[in-house]
Structure formats: structure tokens, C-alpha cells
Amino acid sequence: MTERIRPSGGLSRGREPKMFDLTGRTAVVTGALGHLGPVWIKALLSAGARVAGLDLQDAPNSTAFELLVAEFGEDHLCLYRADVLNRASLEKARSSCSDDLDVPTILVNNAGIDQPPGAATESHQLHEIPVDMFSEVLNVNVAGAFLVSQVFGEEMVRCGNGSIINIGSLYASVSPDARIYNHIDVDPPFLKPPAYGASKAGLVNLTKYLATHWGPYGVRVNALSPGGVLGDQDEQFKDKFVARVPLGRMAKEPDLIGPLLFLASDASSYVTGTELRIDGGFTAW
Ligand SMILES: NC(=O)c1ccc[n+]([C@@H]2O[C@H](COP(=O)([O-])OP(=O)(O)OC[C@H]3O[C@@H](n4cnc5c(N)ncnc54)[C@H](O)[C@@H]3O)[C@@H](O)[C@H]2O)c1
């Protein structure tokens, strides 16, 4: 008979789930109306947190977000329009969030820009990619996360309590394999933007910087780097992508929940400055 392994650290049966409990906490999630925003938000709400979703003034409404408001109520989930590159709009959102929900002690820097294969409206040869396109990705994905962290992190430092989670990507660690995209019928051939991985690698390093500076104030900062999340990608893309994943599939939305709650909650109370990859082993080869 195999012996049951008990958790170390003196935990008694029944106490473990509390470690992931976020009751009484308030979280901010940027990019709330995109694909993954509502996934993170639902995870946080389900763990008991109140959540402020932030997104651009002109970002289209999201059915997934609306369903969460209906399920959890406006006293638990609010939407504020703010641009991660506009300090005044972020300060306004911070003030509204504190009034409507509470002072946030969890921040998920999720807003980001990319060019997924299906959105290949304009392609360029590598040597002709306009530098403005490159800069825009770096600005939103790195400078934006920095500005949001400044605005919301200031209060966390003052309170002596906080968890900031920067959403990275598998492409923070490895370059995209162009062969995964070479069936896309555009001329010049589709290129995953070179600025995307550069921005995510920069974000992982920024994570370490903030973690070392704010650690003494009780604010933890970590990166969470998903691999490809199953969506409406074409079949050829999915087949080629999955062939490179040791776990043999793309990420599904529920795969993202545990890692997020781990980093957001006291379950990771001694974890800071690290990158947790949810990539099915893609970057392990
Ligand atoms: N979907 C994936 O497979 C995947 C994989 C790895 C990493 N990621 C990362 O996860 C995050 C979310 O991805 P997604 O698939 O939901 O993207 P998405 O494009 O569906 O959503 C991004 C959201 O960010 C918002 N946004 C963009 N610029 C903004 C700005 N200046 N200010 C405020 N909001 C802004 C957009 O309006 C949008 O709602 C991104 O950082 C992305 O790089 C996604």
C-alpha cells in the first residue's frame, strides 16, 4: 500500500484551501475586456476578491465580462476606462476603485498588444518593419505595465502589502518558430512581431527590478507567462504548435487559474521576482 504524503510545514487537513482565499481583497486587472482578462477576473472573483477591470475608452464591450458582472454583482466587479499609458486616467481609476470597492492590493498587468496570426492585416519583411510599430508594442507591454505598477504599487508600498502579477508569454524566453506561421497566406510572410518577445522579456526583467525594490515593503512582484491559449486559431497553426508542446496540447483557460491564484494569494507568500510559465513545457526542450 502506498503511504499518503502529507503536506509539510505543519498544515492540518482542511487548512490548505485558505491559502488561496482572496476574501476581503481587491484586485485590479488591466486589459479586462480582451480574451484573457475575463479569465483572470473570474478566477479572482471565485476566490472571493472584488475586482476592478481596466480597459481603453474605445475597447469594445465583452460578453464574457458582462456575464461576470451579472454573476458576481456590481459590488464585486467594476469596469473603469483607462489607458495604461495615461497616468491621469490610471489615477482616476485608482480613486474610483478605492471608493467603489476598496484599496487594491492585487494587480494583474494583463493589457498587452500583439499580432496574432489571424489578425495579419499588414505584413512586412523583417528589415522593413516600421520602428513605430516596434515602439508601440514596447510602450504598451512594458512602459504601460510600469506606469500601472507605479500608480497602484505606490499605495501597496504604503500599506505594506501587495501582489503584482505581470502577464508575460512563452516568447519572453524563446523566439517564435516562424515555421508555425508559414502556412498563412500573406506576402511578405507573416512574422510574429519581434517587439512582442522583446517586450515580454523586458517585462520579466522589470518584474525582478520591482520585486527587489518593493520586497522590503511587503509587495511581491512576479511574472506569469502563458503559452498559446486555445482560441479560434486555424487548424494548421494548432497542429504545428501542439507538436512542439511536451504536454501535447494548447493551454485551456482553466489551466491558467491555479497559477494566477497561487501568485495572487498567500499561497506564494515567499515567492517574488520569479517567472511562472504555463506553457505545457514548450520552453523546456
Ligand atoms: N492569448 C494568448 O494565447 C496569450 C499567450 C501568452 C500571453 N498572452 C498575454 O496575455 C495578455 C492578454 O492577452 P489577450 O489574448 O487577452 O489579448 P487581447 O488582445 O484579447 O486583450 C488585450 C486587452 O488589452 C487592452 N489594451 C490594449 N492596449 C491597452 C492600453 N494602452 N491601455 C489599456 N488597455 C489596453 C485591449 O483593449 C484588450 O482588451 C497579453 O499581455 C498577452 O500578451 C496571451
Image (cartoon, grey):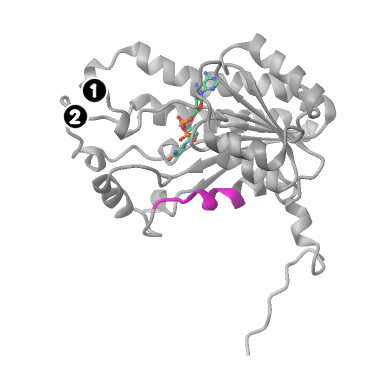
Is residue 274 visible in this depiction of the protein? no
Mark 2 sits near ligand 1, with its Cβ under 8 Å away: no
Q: Secondary structure at mark 1?
A: loop
The part of the image, by quadrant, that contains residue 210 is top right
The residues colored magenta run 250-258
**Residue drawn at (36%, 42%), measured in percent from left and top?**
232
Q: Residue 47: image x %, image y %?
A: 71, 48
Find the distance from the CA under tag 2 to the CA under tag 1. Answer: 7 Å
Number of numbered discs overlaid on the protein picture: 2
Residue type for callout 1:
Ser
| Label at residue 123 | 1
Task: Let me know if residue 9 is in the magenta part.
Answer: no
Is the Cβ of the residue at disc 2 closer than 8 Å to that at disc 1? yes
Compared with 257, 168 (above or below) is: above
Point out the tag, 2 or 1, that comes first from the N-terminus.
1
Rendering coords of residue 188 (x, y %)? 17, 25
Q: Most prominent secondary structure in the magenta stretch?
A: helix
Residue drawn 54% across and 38% down?
A: 64
Residue nearest the viewer, comparing 131 with 152: 152
Q: Is residue 123 above or below residue 180?
A: above
**Residue linked to disc 2:** 189
Which percent across, then down, holds residue 169?
A: 46, 38
Residue displayed at 63% across by 90% down = 1
Q: Is residue 173 left or right of residue 122?
A: right
Instruction: Tell which residue pokes out farthest to the front in this image.
Output: 70
Q: Position of residue 50 (x, y in %)?
A: 74, 36
